[in-house]
Image (cartoon, helix red, strand yellow):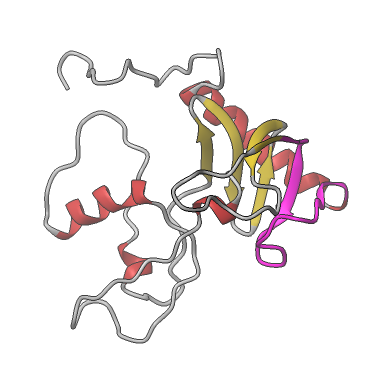
Amino acid sequence: MFDGGCRVPCLMRWPDKIPSNTVCDVPAMTIDVLPTIAKLIKASLPQHPIDGRDIWPLMANEVDAKSPQEAYYFYWGNELHAVRRGPWKLHFAHTYRSLNGEPGGKEGVPAKYENLTIEQSLFNLEDDPGETQNVADQHSEVVKQLITLANQARSELGDGKQCGSGVRKAGTIAKGE
């Protein structure tokens, strides 16, 4: 769940709607596409909760446009690995696969990954997009705020064996939805 693994550029073009030659550096995610398009075409959203929010103000380059999300939560499977709010990203202790600086596969043969571990770590992605400098000791209040947000997400979405109150079985909806 490092930004190098999930951060990708997005190009958009919609003449007379999205201003040309503009750049938005506010994070957004694919979960935000559905509610944005639904708003633009005046479609109703599902009655059950969804994670996405309307990001049209960001796309339209509106003055003072901000992320509609309080935070983004990074899950790997059913485990919460990190939470991001603004420039801050807090990783929780977890193992992950890495090439660890080695080149990727060759001639269709995949490279061997190593399993590495990260301890709880805070990164400022504006200053350190490579997530190399843990600044948790210098920003304990930020860590506390992100842990509070993470605990709210765990309560609703779960974490590992902890089932959240908003979790449904895959491919199912509640009666009446």
User: Could you tell me if residue 53 is visible in this image?
Assistant: no
In the visual, does 89 lie left or right of 138?
A: left
From the top left corner, tell me how far across and down residue 80 is, in percent: 57, 31
Residue at 30%, 63% (x, y): give it: 56
- Quarter of the image where the C terminus is located: top left
Numbered-mark total: 0
From the top left corner, tell me how far across and down residue 105 is, in percent: 53, 50
**Which residue occupies the extreme bottom position in the image?**
21
Residue at 59%, 57% (x, y): give it: 86
- The image quarter containing residue 165 is top left
| Relative depth, front residue between 16 and 81 | 81
From the top left corner, tell me how far across and down residue 59 is, in percent: 33, 69
In the visual, does 141 lie left or right of 33?
A: right
| Relative depth, front residue between 82 and 106 | 106
- Quarter of the image where the N terminus is located: top right
Q: Is residue 123 magenta?
A: yes
Q: Is residue 106 magenta?
A: no
Residue at 74%, 48% (x, y): give it: 122
User: Could you tell me if residue 75 is visible in this image?
Assistant: yes
From the top left corner, tell me how far across and down residue 18 is, in percent: 26, 77
Q: Which residues are magenta?
A: 116-137
**Which residue occupies the extreme right position in the image?**
137
**Which residue occupies the extreme front position in the image?**
107
